[in-house]
Image: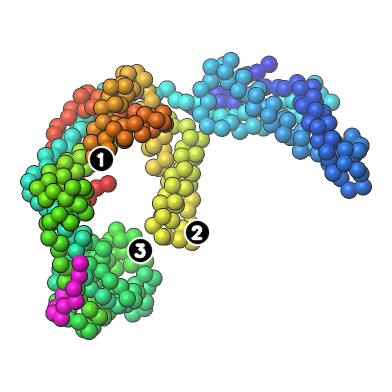
């Protein structure tokens, strides 16, 4: 007999029992199998007495068999009671008398919530829009030239966009602080690698000059030990180099992807890539706006177990990303609780999306998937090869289907909500991920 108790809004407790004979049978079979090759001091392989085998392996085998039996019993009970289990159950043995006919246990678990959605029609949503302008194309070509600049040593005061070679030391309240010292540093000014106030202090310095200045770190600076605080830096300028931009010629054309080196196609190529990138970033920003709108009208509890699992996942991904950037995460104290708020939001969104997609039929249609793959392939010289690459592996197609599904969802939200178009700022758009 099984029974299900309601513990809280999402938490349930299943009380059930397992025939002791079922577990004994599994234990007996496994012990016999082990006995065939068991190696125990004082006995020849395969000749160990059954009682000795049971003493050595019995408790562990019994625990394994009992755990497996509870899992099977729980899954059968959940299915027969139409329980949508969220996360992993917590088992507790209530009675495990070897002489009893039944092993009694309880399993505490959570169920998926009923996703309750409100009305989107009253929710205000901004849809960012932007059309690439000729000036954007010109500026991008200039940026591409700067990325490929060569540098020549000059004997003059530092200007913005120069490359400088410096040593620096920083002090907080007269004492050095972590991260406040650099030796043999080479940096191009104006690209945002250093803080604006730090770069501004270097501009105007001359080779072999030493300069001390005060600077206040931003309140939101990642180094908490100096965030919002005033420090003193001493900078030694060892050398200045001026940028020399490449000519817009055949060599430059090939370097940015115009394979035949046709200079006349540079603007066309840059415009095409820029339009594609702007479109991608608009989609990301508008997706975020659509997701926030859905969160506003959703009212339901989120299973704690799913949030715990997601917090662990988010923490691990964050650590991996930091390691890939050269940061020593082993010295940092990470706890899943630090990521719980983000994890809860992700889980809630996942439940919302599943409900909305199924209810309103927003799954990707085959023609949409094909169109997205073909559009993506246009960015490559070998379009047909890219299309065949996706077709060769269903997993790749599924990834595209998920992207199409997201676009369908965003379009649906924008159609249901009180949506207003807002002109995006080009620089803000390109600085976002």
Check the picture and name the quadrant holding the N terminus: top right
Frontmost residue, 93 versus 164: 164
Frontmost residue, 432 versus 171: 432
Q: Residue 67 location, x and y as percent?
A: 69, 31
Looking at the rendered structure, the secondary structure element under dot 2 is helix
Q: CA distance from mark 2 to mark 3?
A: 17 Å
User: Does 151 appear above or below 423?
Assistant: below
Q: Residue 240 location, x and y as percent?
A: 20, 76
Q: Residue 97 location, x and y as percent?
A: 80, 29
Mark 1 packing: few (<14 Cα in 10 Å), some, or many (20+)?
few
Query: What is the span of residues highlighted in magenta in the rendered image?
Result: 150-158
**Mark 2 against mark 3, which lies toward the viewer?**
2
Asked if one can make out residue 323 in the rendered structure from this viewpoint, the answer is: yes
Specify which label sits upstream in the sequence, 2 or 3.
Answer: 3
* Residue at left offset 53%, top offset 20%: 83
User: Is residue 152 rendered magenta in the image?
Assistant: yes
Task: Tell me whether the residue at label 2 lies in contact with that at label 1, contact meaning CB atoms closer than 8 angstroms.
Answer: no
């Amino acid at each position: 007999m099984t029974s299900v108790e309601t513990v809280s809004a999402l938490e349930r407790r299943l009380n059930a029992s397992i025939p002791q004979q079922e577990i004994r049978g599994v234990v007996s079979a496994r012990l016999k199998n082990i006995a065939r090759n068991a190696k125990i001091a004082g006995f020849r392989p395969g000749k160990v007495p059954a009682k000795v085998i049971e003493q050595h392996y019995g408790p562990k085998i019994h625990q394994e068999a009992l755990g497996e039996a509870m899992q099977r019993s729980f899954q059968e009970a959940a299915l027969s009671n139409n329980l949508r289990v969220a996360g992993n159950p917590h088992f507790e043995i209530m009675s495990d008398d070897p002489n009893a006919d039944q092993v009694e246990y309880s399993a505490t678990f959570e169920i998926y919530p009923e996703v309750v959605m409100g009305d989107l029609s009253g929710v205000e949503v901004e849809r960012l829009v932007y059309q690439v302008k000729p000036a954007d194309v010109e500026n991008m070509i200039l940026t591409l030239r700067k990325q490929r600049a060569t540098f020549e040593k000059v004997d003059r005061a530092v200007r913005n966009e120069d490359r400088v070679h410096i040593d620096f030391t920083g002090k907080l309240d007269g004492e050095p602080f972590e991260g406040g010292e650099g030796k043999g540093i080479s940096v191009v000014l104006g690209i945002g690698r250093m803080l604006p106030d730090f770069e501004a202090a270097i501009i105007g310095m001359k080779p072999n000059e030493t300069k001390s200045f005060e600077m206040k770190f931003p309140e939101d600076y990642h180094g908490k030990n100096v965030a919002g605080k005033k420090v003193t830096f001493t900078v030694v300028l060892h050398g200045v180099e001026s940028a020399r931009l490449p000519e817009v010629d055949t060599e430059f054309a090939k370097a940015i992807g115009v394979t035949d080196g046709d200079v006349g196609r540079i603007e066309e190529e840059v415009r095409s890539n820029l339009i594609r990138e702007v479109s991608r970033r608009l989609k990301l920003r508008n997706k975020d706006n659509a997701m926030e709108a859905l969160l506003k009208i959703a009212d339901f509890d989120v299973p704690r177990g799913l949030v715990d699992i997601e917090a662990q996942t988010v923490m691990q991904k964050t650590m991996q990303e930091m390691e890939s950037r050269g940061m020593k995460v082993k010295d940092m104290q990470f706890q899943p609780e630090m990521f719980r708020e983000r994890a809860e939001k992700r889980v809630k969104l996942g439940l919302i999306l599943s409900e909305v997609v199924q209810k309103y039929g927003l799954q990707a249609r085959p023609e949409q998937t094909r169109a997205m793959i073909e559009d993506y392939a246009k960015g490559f010289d070998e379009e047909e090869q890219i299309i065949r690459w996706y077709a060769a592996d269903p997993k790749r197609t599924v990834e595209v289907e998920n992207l199409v599904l997201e676009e369908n969802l965003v379009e649906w939200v924008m159609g249901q909500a009180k949506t207003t178009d807002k002109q995006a700022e080009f620089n803000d758009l390109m600085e976002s991920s």
